[in-house]
Image (cartoon, coloured by chain):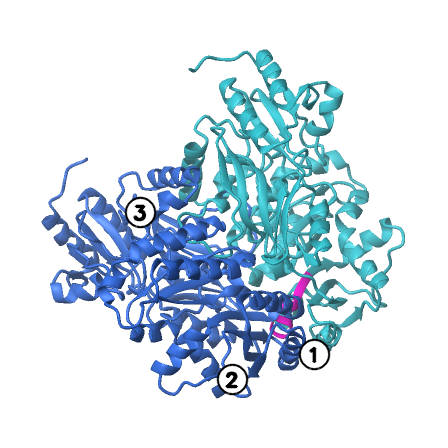
Chain colours: A cyan, B blue
Amino acid sequence: MNQHIAPETALARFAAIVGERHVVTAPGDMAPHLKEARDLYQGVARAVLKPGSTEEVAAIVRLAREARLAVVPQGGNTGLVGGQIPTGDVDAVVVSLTRLDKVREVDALTDTMTLEAGITLLKAQEVADGIDRLFPLSLASEGSCTIGGNIAANAGGTAVIAYGNTRELVLGLEVVLADGRVWHGLNKLRKDNTGYDLKDLFIGSEGTLGIVTAAVLKLFPKPRARATAMAAVPSPKAALALLTLAKAQAGQALTTFELIPRIGIDFVIRHQPGTRDPLATPSPWYVLIELSSSQERGTEELLEGLLGEAIEAGLVTDATLAASLDQRTALWSLREGLSDAQRYEGGSIKHDVSVPVAHVPDFIAEASEAVRAFMPGCRPVPFGHMGDGNIHFNVSQPEGTDKDAFIGRWDAMNDLVHAIVVNYGGSISAEHGIGRLKRHLLPGVKDPVALDLMRAIKRTLDPQGLLNPGAVL
Amino acid sequence: MNQHIAPETALARFAAIVGERHVVTAPGDMAPHLKEARDLYQGVARAVLKPGSTEEVAAIVRLAREARLAVVPQGGNTGLVGGQIPTGDVDAVVVSLTRLDKVREVDALTDTMTLEAGITLLKAQEVADGIDRLFPLSLASEGSCTIGGNIAANAGGTAVIAYGNTRELVLGLEVVLADGRVWHGLNKLRKDNTGYDLKDLFIGSEGTLGIVTAAVLKLFPKPRARATAMAAVPSPKAALALLTLAKAQAGQALTTFELIPRIGIDFVIRHQPGTRDPLATPSPWYVLIELSSSQERGTEELLEGLLGEAIEAGLVTDATLAASLDQRTALWSLREGLSDAQRYEGGSIKHDVSVPVAHVPDFIAEASEAVRAFMPGCRPVPFGHMGDGNIHFNVSQPEGTDKDAFIGRWDAMNDLVHAIVVNYGGSISAEHGIGRLKRHLLPGVKDPVALDLMRAIKRTLDPQGLLNPGAVL
């Protein structure tokens, strides 16, 4: 039974499963699946397979197992930690899920939609919108990232403060296991206490425990009104006090709370045509704040009242409320342009980290001081989801220095910043995952018992190490 | 190393761990830990151990392992499926967690509290209240059930529609594993994508994979205003349409949506002194609806507007808004008195089930018809958390018949109702868990692949079957 299949023979048998034209082997055709956004990895694969159904995915996995080929699942190939790229250390096939793009069901009364894994996030948002509902997951890459990838990575984004991570948005899953069986877990229930929570084991496991082929996702009432403001704050500490005030006054209506440093605003204004300073006088820090409500009226007044009180308390020095959709877009573009604008300022060493919300100000201060001492002239640009304690602590290179030399210090600077993160009980990967990029860091930051449990679970669910070897563990 | 320790010797060594007086062996002292509310199980244990710290729990588990004694963790002993009661089929000790009752930390800026497992839910609510926050979990047994038990059972309750189950309220856990090691996972982070989600594996595992000793729990802004109404609706279908309308208009402000049949109101009025009909004319069905908001004003108007629109649309025939705290209490007492009032009407066969929200009306109709055909004269009292699809389908015995004969039909009626539940893609245990009561039902209703995965995980985390054997699997 354990007869080895020659990989060449396997390719012909893969073609019999998915069809000749869905077995991609020409280097030019494979290329879009083997490179990723930041050019950190150059993939190596025997083929890219494009199954069109769950059964085809299962058949691929069974055959790969027989042929001793590793399987690397891939969605929109937008991951930032290399989890979707086989790197040549084992003989592997990429399984691209993009042809699994059917909307299986939309249920307005239960407030769920059942989507196949290859559907893009943008399309998922549109499906929800089509029945006057909100699917709140929202990311920079939403036009190309897929629901399957979002689930594999437990994607975060800008609405987590109100709606949670991807994990909180999933009710049920359909998963192809490492032995080629299919777990039919497309549960539409809000309450189900019949045994262990398998769903959450697969969510965020980055394709190492199973391949998600479909999911039941939660839908929410669509907000009827939104109020958006950019508030100037003197410090992250003032921003934290503003956050506490906003939660007390707006409660669940608080849907965005993003911290932006002055240097970030400078970068965006400098490099993104059409953007401009949100307020007359520059401030060292800003908060992009948004409230959403199912009621047509009252949201703007609520935000005005909140900002007024914050100004009186000295937490906010100035603020502007968006009076139109255009003005809202202009404020959001200052936040959304941050990552891209940094590219024009030379190299940028990234840290996707989180700490308990209470420690965000101290973390920013301490980490900024540490990297400046480590490399005089470097420019920290800490920004992001302050409401979740998730700061993108990106550091731009010193002006007028060599980019490659700067990027060469990536690991050393990471070590410095991550040590501070761990000291505050934080996470070295708040929303991007571990993938291949951060795998070597895990033993240094993770509770050894947790790591041991993770390894035991991997051995149990994938004893042959077939699924995405080299990622996470 | 594998030397067997005589159980008698083990008791002396347990005393060395927890102290002589915390090893309870006298039948009278053990009794409160070996009987449960519904008198379905009479427990048998060698001793009840009352550790005072996580380290003592770990030492107990290590010693129990050596002595080949099973360990049954117990919180407030309020579980409804016997998960906390050893039944004598194996030699076992009960580990009561109630002495682990320290508030380890309250963090108002991060909106978390870190509590030991033995703290009661009521105390947890009070800790939150003490810093002007809400811990939204709310159950009938909150005065005696414990946080550890809530987590082990993934408790639900009346606020799930707005805040989720216990699972959604937990950020981090500390767990004693079956090998006596401690997983230190008291994470306070809203975002952490560094590997597999271990936390959710333990939540809802009913003490079979590890013993929860402490948890980090989420806190929420405290609502400043609440509006409560009892609405008369002609049918569950109208109630469903009202739910859809309420979600669209009130969004996240909708915090309660409970369905009550007329017979339930009759029972409460008949048996609970001081209760009375909420409306002038009887209605076949009622909905207890509550909105909550962080804003002082507008909530009552919102509810009035919603009910007005529902009356115009024919979904609601009459409604009363609570104009005072007393009136609110009176409306809630009609809902909260339901379980108890049924006791005075003779035997009651219970089904804690859920279906996709869209199917609630069909499920109620079909199951009511089925049990009436099965046993003419029996009186279905389907009530509960309609917003979550979770109906307590309780059936009172026919008037004037023998209670024991009726209760003797428990399993047969369960089979009938559960078959309908499964047909609608529902769950046979929405919020009470599997425990010992429903274990035999699992193979009939659960996806075999899921069951297989559960067994594999149990073998991996507890290869000797030390923790709560006989529960769940």
* Residues at marks 2 and 1 on the same chain: no
Which numbered dot is residue B279?
A: 2
Q: Nearer the viewer, mark 1 or mark 3?
A: 3
Q: Secondary structure at mark 2?
A: loop
User: Could you give the CA–CA distance between mark 1 and mark 3, rounded to whole angstroms?
Assistant: 59 Å
Determine whether label 2 and label 3 are within 8 Å by CB.
no
**Dividing the picture into quarters, in which one does residue A344 lie?**
top right
Q: Height in image: A97 above or below B268?
A: above
Q: Nearer the viewer, mark 2 or mark 3?
A: 2
Relative depth, front residue between A370 and B265: B265
Horizontal and vertical percent position of residue B221: 56, 71
Categorize mark 1 by other alpha carbons within 10 Å: few (<14), some (14-19), many (20+): some
For label 1, the residue is A309
For the stretch drawn in magenta, what is the main secondary structure?
helix
Horizontal and vertical percent position of residue A109: 61, 58
Q: Secondary structure at mark 1?
A: helix
User: Could you give the CA–CA distance between mark 2 and mark 3, rounded to whole angstroms?
Assistant: 44 Å
Q: Secondary structure at mark 3?
A: helix
Disc 2 residue type? Leu
Residue at 22% across, 59% down: B41
Disc 3 residue type? His
Q: Nearer the viewer, mark 2 or mark 1?
A: 2
Give, as a single range, the part of the protein colored magenta.
A248-257
* Residues at marks 1 and 3 on the same chain: no
What subunit carries mark 2? B
